[in-house]
Image (tube, grey):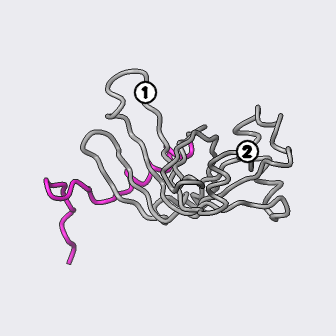
């Protein structure tokens, strides 16, 4: 028997995840040039948020290029738990009514010997051509998130919880 679609309530504002929510989350991620990354600060364990350039692999895994010298890279090297916030407000209206998605998981450093490094680098440079100036510096590495879950705010009153599978691109 089919259960009725979950409707938001005062007790639970989360809607049932549907194909439109999945597509919106994927699109927010694919379109993003930048995201905010939240990590646990190395010295204190306090939350640290920074802006990073970002891209997304076909399987829905976000990845960033970052210097080993940055605070967020140093924090991730010790504790990979992190979240990435995708979605920028449009030019008009209340910024909090624009869609955004927070992706939660663990971020791991990818070594240059990784078999996918050359393809990942080429893909990155198509999305971020100005990074050609530093992509090959010795202290810069790609870091990829293994997604565990995500929270989508699709606009006012449109909250969803998504799984890693929900974020996989069609055909991945």
On screen, residue 157 above or below 83: above
Q: Magenta span has 5? A: yes
Helix, strand, or loop for circle 1?
A: loop
Q: Which residues are magenta?
A: 1-30
Task: In the displayed orientation, state which residue is furthest to the left.
Answer: 10
Q: Residue at x 26, y 56 (%)?
A: 14
Which residue is drawn at the image coordinates 36% and 30% (left, top)? 95
Task: Residue 20: give its label.
Answer: none
List the residue tagged with mark 2: 124
Tag 2's secondary structure?
helix
Distance of label 2 from label 1 (alpha carbons): 25 Å
Q: Is residue 21 left or right of residue 129?
A: left
The total number of labels drawn is: 2
The residue labelled by disc 1 is: 90
- In the rendered image, the vertical position of residue 94 relative to residue 79, given as above or below: above
Q: Callout 2: 10 Å neighbours few (<14), some, many (20+)?
A: many
Q: Quadrant of the C terminus?
A: bottom right
Q: Position of residue 110 (x, y in %)?
A: 74, 60
Q: Quadrant of the N terminus?
A: bottom left
The picture places residue 148, in percent across and down from the top left corner, at: 49, 65
Horizontal and vertical percent for residue 37?
54, 47
Left or right of 61? Residue 14 is: left
In the image, residue 155 sits, relative to residue 79, either above or below, namely above
Residue situated in front as seen by the camera: 134 or 24:
134
Does 124 appear above or below 3?
above
């Amino acid at each position: 028997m089919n259960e009725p679609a979950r409707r938001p309530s005062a007790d639970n504002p989360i809607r049932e995840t549907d194909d439109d929510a999945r597509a919106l989350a994927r699109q927010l991620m694919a379109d993003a040039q930048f995201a905010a990354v939240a990590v646990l600060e190395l010295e204190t364990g306090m939350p640290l948020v920074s802006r990073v350039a970002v891209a997304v692999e076909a399987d829905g895994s976000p990845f960033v290029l970052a210097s080993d010298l940055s605070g967020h890279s140093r924090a991730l090297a010790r504790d990979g738990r992190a979240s990435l916030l995708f979605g920028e407000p449009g030019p008009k209206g209340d910024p909090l009514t624009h869609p955004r998605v927070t992706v939660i998981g663990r971020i791991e450093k990818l070594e240059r010997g990784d078999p996918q490094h050359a393809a990942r680098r080429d893909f990155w440079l198509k999305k971020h051509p100005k990074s050609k100036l530093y992509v090959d510096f010795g202290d810069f590495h790609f870091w990829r998130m293994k997604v565990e879950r995500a929270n989508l705010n699709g606009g006012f009153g449109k909250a969803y919880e998504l799984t890693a599978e929900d974020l996989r691109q069609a055909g991945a």
